[in-house]
Image: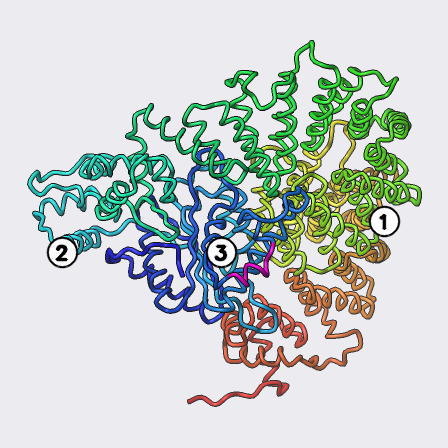
Amino acid sequence: MSNSAFTVTPLVGREEEFTRLTGVLERARAGEARAVLVAGDAGVGKTRLLDEVAARAVGDGVTVLTGHCVDLGDVGLPYLPFTEVLGALAADERFAPALAARPAVGRLLGGGADSARDMGVRLRLFEDVAGLLTDLAGTAPLLLVLEDLHWADQSSRDLLRFLLSRGVLHRPAGGAPGSRLALLASYRADDLHRRHPLRPLLAELVRLPSVERLELRPMADAEVTRLVRVLQEDQQRALPEATVRRIVERAEGNAFYAQELLAATDPGAGGVPDALADVLLIRFEQVSDTAQQVLRTAAVAGRRVEHGLLREAAGLPEEALESALREAVERRLLVSADGDTYSFRHALAREAVYADLLPGERARLHGAFARLLSGRDPGGDTAAERAHHYRESHDLPEALAASLQAADHAKRLGAPAEELRHLEAALDLWASVPAEARPQAEAGDRITLMLRASAAAAHAGESHRAVSLARAALAGVGRDADSELAARVRYTLAGNLLDVDSLTAAYAYSSEALALIPADPPTPTWVWAAATHVLAARQVGEVRTAERVAHEALKAAEALDLTDARADLLVSLAYFDGRRSPEGRARLSEARELARGSGNAPVELRALFHLAIGAFEAGAVRESLPWLDEGLDRARGAGLLSSPYPLEMRYLRLMALYMLGRWDECVRASEQDAGVLPPAGAFTVGPALFVRLARGDESVVARAEELLRGPFDWMSALVAGIVLTDAAARGGDPEGAVARMRASVESLTDDSGALPDVTVRLAALALSAVADAAVACRAAGDEAGARRWADTAGELAGLARESAGRGVNGRPQGPEGLAWLARAEAECVRAERGPDPDAWAAAVSAFEYGDPYEQARARLPFAEALLAADRREEAAAEAHAARETAERLGAGPLLERVDALLRRARLGDSPSAGGGPARLTAREQDVLRLLSLGRSNRQIGEELFITGKTASVHVSNILAKLGAASRTEAVAIAYREGLVTREPTG
C-alpha cells in the first residue's frame, strides 16, 4: 500500500541518486535497516525522486508509507506526519492486528486515555511506534517516507530521533538479521537558517552509522535540457531552440522551475515570465474561474486538503467541484492522493496562489476552515489548525480559545515544547482580545498564563525561556496586585533563576517573596516561598538562614497539612544533615514517600535524585543506579524527563556507568537519552565524551568546545572543562591544561566565591602535564624551568586541597573527591621531587572505591615510580594490571602508554615471565598472520570482520607480548619463534 501519488513524468538527471536509494532499499530488504536524509532546495526534485523510488518499491512488493509535515506557522500539530502514516494503516483492515498489538499508538489516532499521566508516557508511545514499524517490516519489507522535515513539529522531530538512534535501525545481537526497513526523509536545505530547529537534529542523525545524507544539487544544464526535451515530447509540443535555452538558463538546474517555465510558455509569444511566482500564477490563471476558486480555497487549507472539507469551504455543488478538481489535476496544479485528499503538486505552487489572495479573501477563507474544523472536531485534535485559521481570519477571541485548547492537547500528549508554543501564541493574542471575550476574564489570568508557560518551558528543558516568561509575569504584576500572586511570581522566578545558576538574583527575589506575605498566620504561598528561599539561601552560602527558614517552614507545612511542601523541606534539611549520613537518608526516604502520596512528581523526583547522589558521593556508585532508574521511570510517567532533576539524574546515571567501567553501555544510554528527548547539552553527552576521549576519539575536543557556545550553562562548562583540560594534558600542553583548568574554575565559581567541587579533579588533570614538564626540565638540566613548574604544581595542589576539604556544607568531599586529591598530591610530589611510590600507592588505593579507569591511569605512574626505585616485580604487576583494564575498556591511548613502558623496561608479559614470547590468543594469532602479510589495520579489520580500531588494539597487544618496538620487529620475532610460517606465493 501507499498513501503517496506517483507521477508519470520521467525521471531525468537523477540516475546516480536513484541507484543509491534503490541500493539502500535492497539492503533493507536483506535485513539491513537504513535511513537516508534527502536534502535539497525547494523544487530541486526531492519529491519526484522519492516518488520514483517508492514506485519501484511498490513494484517489488514493498509496503510504502508516506507522511507529510505541514507548515502551520509558528505552532505545530504534534506528530502530524506519523499521524498520517498511522491513519493510512488504520484505514486498511490488513493492519488491524498490528495496530491492536501496539495500544500506545492509539493516542495518535484519537484514542487512548485522556489523563495527563497516561498520555504523558512518551517513551511508551515512541517504543510502540518503533515496534509497530518493526512488526510491519517483519511481514513485508517496509519503506517509510517522510516529506518536508523542515516543517516538522518538535514532537515529530523527537520521535524521528528516537526511531533512528534507537528504535528501528539497530541490528539485533548474535548476528540475527535486522528489520527489513528503509526510511527516506526529505527537507528543504534552503529553509534551514542558522537557528532552524531541524539543524541540530540533522547534525546528530548523520553521525549514526545507519543514517546517511543525500544532497540533491542543481542539475547540470545538459540534464535540464534533456528534461525539457522529454517533457516536450510527452506534451507533443515543439519549442524553438532559443526558447529551450532560455528555459534552461532561467531554471538554473532546478527541475521544478524548468517544468513550470515550460508549462507556462506560450510558443507564439516566445517569452517567459521573469520570476517563478509569475510562472505559477500564469498557469493558475489559465484554468477556469471555478477551478481558480477551488485552488485559492485549497491554498488556504495548506499543502493537502480533504475532499469534503474543501467542498464545504468552497461552497460549490459536488458536480462543479469535481469538474474544477479534474481540471486542476489535468493541468498538474493538484495531485489526487489516497484518503480522498488533494495536494498541490509542489509547495511553491501553493505558496504562490496563497500569496496572490486578496487580504479580505484570505481572511474569509481562513475563517471558513476554522468554523468547519470547529464543527467537525470541537475537541483538541485539530486545535492547532483551528488556532492557525482563526488567527489568520482575525477572529482573535476564537484564536485565543483554540490556542489554549491546543496547549491542553499538547500537554496531554506529553509534548511540552508544543504546549509552550501554543501558550505563547495565546499570550500574544491576550491583549488584543477584550476581557469579556477571553476564556477566563478574572483578574490576574494573564499572569497565571505566563507562570504556566514558564513551567512548560522548564519541563521542555528551556530554562532560559522559563526565566524570561517569569520575568514578564513580574513586569505585569502591578503595585496594587494581590500580595499572594506577587509573591508567587517572585518565588517562581527565583526557582527558575536557580536552574540557570543566577544565584544572587534568585536569592533577592526569594527574599522579596517572603517579605510580601506574613509568616504568621502561615499560608501555603508563604510555605512555598520559604521552601524556594531555603534553596536560594543555601546556594549563596547563607546556610544558617537556610536552615532556620527550613525548620520554620516545616512546622508551618505540618500545621497546614501541606504534604508535598513537607516533603520538599525534608529534602532541604537532609542536605544540611548530609546526604550520606543516616539522618539525611532517613529524611530523604520520608520525603520520597510523602511526595509520592501527595502526587507531587517534581518533589518526588527531587527526593529520588538526592537519594541517588548521596549513594554516589559515598562511593556506593552501583547502589545509586536503582534510585536513578526509579526516578527516570517516574519522570517518564509524569512527562517531566526534560525538567531539571531528571536532567541531573540522566547525567548522574551516565556518570555512574562510566565510573563502573560499563563504557559501551554508557555510550548507548547517552544515544538513547538523546533519542527520546531533545538534546540537553552536557547532561546527555558529558560522560560519553569522557569515554570517547579515553578511547582516543579526536573529535571530542571540537564537540566539547561546542558546549561552550551560546548562553552560559553550568553543566556544559563543567563537562567542557574536564574534557579540554584532560585533552591538553594528554597532548603534552601544560600551559594549555593549566589555562583551561583556571578558566573552568573561574566560570564555575558561584556568587559565594567558594571553589566548585570539580576543582580537585581539574587540578589533578592539569597537574599531570605540569609534572611531566617539571620532570623534562629536570632531566635537561633546566633547574629554573623545573622550579617554575614545581611552583605551579604547588599552587594547583593547594586549590585541590581547598576544594576537597570544603566539600558540601564545609564537610570533606566523598571518596571520589579524595581519590582525585590523592592523585593531585602524587603529581605535585613528582613535579617537586620526582616519582614517589608511596604517594602513587595512595592514589591507586584511593580509586578502589569504584573507578577502574582512573585507577589504571594512576597505576601507570605508580609502575614508573616503582621502576625508579628498582622494584621491578611490583612495577610489572602494576603495569599489567593497568594494561588489563585499558584493554577491557578499549582505552587505546592508555594501552599504548602502558605497552611502551613494558617494552622500554622489558618487563615481559607478566612479573614472572621467563623471557620468551607470551602466548597469543587465537584472535591475536589471526591478526599476526595478516600482519606478516603486510596488511594495514584497516585491511586486517575487513578480513576479520572487526573495526580498524579493534585491529589496532590487537596489534598493540601483540607488540607488547613479543616485546617488539614496531610491526616489522614483531613479524621478525614471530618468524624466528615459529609463531607464523611463510605462506607460499603464486
Q: Residue 9's image quarter? A: bottom left
Q: Mark 1 to mark 3: distance in Å?
A: 53 Å
Q: Residue 526's image quarter? A: top right
Q: Residue at x 47, y 43 (%)?
A: 152
Amino acid type at image mark 3: Ala
Q: Which residues are magenta?
A: 96-103
The spot of residue 927 in percent (x, y) is: 58, 77
Q: Nearer the viewer, mark 2 or mark 3?
A: 3
Amino acid type at image mark 1: Ala
Q: Residue 947's image quarter? A: bottom right
Numbered circle sitting on residue 618? 1
- Can residue 795 be seen in this snapshot? no
In the figure, 95 relative to 906: above or below?
Answer: above
Residue that label 3 marks: 90
Residue that label 2 marks: 233
In the figure, 81 relative to 574: above or below?
Answer: below
Please identify the quadrant where the C terminus is shown: bottom left
Q: Nearer the viewer, residue 579 or 641?
A: 641
